[in-house]
Structure formats: structure tokens, C-alpha cells
Amino acid sequence: MNETEARQAIGVLTAYYPRDEVPASTVAAWSAALADYDVRDAIGAANVLGADRRFLPSLAEWLVEVRAVRRDRWQREEARALPEGGYISLAEWRERQGREAHGDGEAAADGGHDAG
């Protein structure tokens, strides 16, 4: 996320704790630490923590929750990518692996195996 998005996420988190002042240096440090994450995950984590914690969490505590929210989002996205019924056949899985291994979206003519 960019700095504007990070400040937005920090604003969501700190809104739950109106009595706590967050110095500009802390905002800058947290913004830098959040740069590698998606703003949706940071805001989601802020909402979870704000609803569950009485006191402003540390950056480390927030990042643990950000990663948990991200993991949950990824799992939901993967589940939506599966066909109805929630599974694929072994043959289809092998075909997908072959396409990914070749990087061009097409399985090799020999079933995904190298000739040499």
C-alpha cells in the first residue's frame, strides 16, 4: 500500500482508541511497516482489533492480525477459484501444474514432462 492508504488504515485503527495520541513519528514508522501489505487487510485487521481490544495494539500485534486477515482473504479467493463442489480432479490438477510450469498457459504436448 502507499503512504496515503497506510495513513487511512492507521486512522481506522486509532479511531477505536480516541484517548490515545499517536505521535507523527509512530504514524511514519507504522506507514513504512505497512507498505508491503494490502490496505484492505490492514483496515480489516484494524476493525477486528478495534472490536476486540480495549487498548491500542502495538505495531507487532496489528501486523499479526493483518497477516491473519490476508491469509483468510487468500483462502476465500482460492475457494472461489475452485469449481462447484470445491475440488478438482487429479488429472485437472496435473494439467494446471503443467501449464504453470511452462509459464505460457499451455501444457506441453507430452503431458507436461520434459523429453530430456
Image (spheres, rainbow, N blue to C red):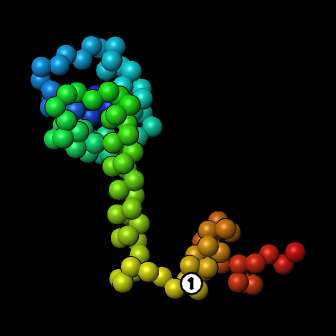
3 sits to left or right of 92? left
Give the side of residue 27 with respect to residue 54, left or right: right
Residue visible at 22% across and 32% down in the picture: 13
Q: Which amino acid does label 1 sit on?
A: Leu
Q: In which quarter of the image is the C terminus?
A: bottom right
Relative to 96, residue 11 above or below:
above
Which quadrant holds residue 83? bottom left
Any part of residue 3 in sight? no
Label 1 residue SS: helix
Of residue 98 and residue 58, the one placed in the foreground of this image is 58
Can the viewer see residue 55 in this picture? Answer: yes
Q: Please, is residue 57 above or below residue 24 in the view?
A: below
Q: Where is residue 54 in the image (x, y as percent from the top left)?
A: 16, 31
- Residue at 35% across / 28% down in the picture? 59
Q: Is residue 71 above or below residue 13?
A: below
Residue at left offset 39%, top offset 62%: 75
Residue position marked by numbered label 1 in the rendering: 90
Residue closer to the observer: 99 or 73:
73
